[in-house]
Image (spheres, rainbow, N blue to C red):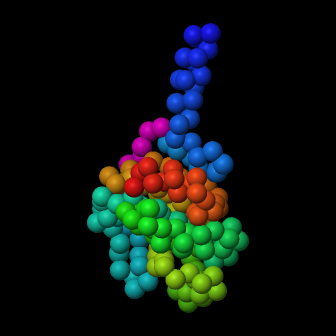
Amino acid sequence: MKFLIIFIFLFSNVFADEVTNLKNIVIHKELKKYDLITFLDIENNQIDLKDYKGNLILLNFWATWCAPCKEEMPSLDELSKNKELNNLIIFPINVGKDSTDKSFQFFKNLKIENLNLYFDAPITLAKKFQLRGIPTSILLDKNGYEFARIIGSIDFEDKDFIKWLSNYN
């Protein structure tokens, strides 16, 4: 019986960081470090993530033609306003080679008011992060290490997700 209790305790701690009802979150056992992470803002200025060290970062890769991206973007917009995550910075990065006008229209149609547009040109981050599809979101800790990724769309307003993410804030 003692062995069984110890086994259950140890086994439950292995999965302590799991987000129970969100199946497409991959939590890394070993953090991943990337050297240079840069992308472009709407005015073609280069954004370098090393300038945001000390913040929790969410890089969301999307495209205007992606139906799951369209589905999750409003909840991502709402997440950006969450006061529990005051150290979170969200960068929605278009990897679909969409024009600025088409991207603006996508945000306008979805009533996205709190997020800015960013672009991965010439598609370097998609390769660097080895994206297999979109939407994909990369979560970086305060030191710039990838600790998790979300493959596919989720509801960014989900209370379990927010509670889990606040542990890294």
Residue for point 63% across, 82% down? 110
Quadrant location of the C terminus in the rendered image: bottom left
The range drawn in magenta is 29-33
Is 32 part of what is drawn in magenta? yes
The answer to whether 4 is drawn above or below residue 87 in the figure is above
Q: In front: 163, or 90?
A: 163
Give the residue displayed 35% in from the left and 72% down from the top: 47
The reply, left or right, for residue 147 in relation to residue 152 is left
Residue 46: x percent and y percent? 35, 75
Name which quarter of the figure residue 102 lies in. Answer: bottom right
Q: Which residue sits at x=56%, y=77%?
A: 97
How many numbered tags mark residues here? 0
In the rendered image, the residue lying farthest to the right is: 67
Is 113 left or right of 55, judged from the image as shown? Answer: right
Which quarter of the rendering shows the N terminus? Answer: top right
Q: Is residue 100 on the magenta stretch?
A: no
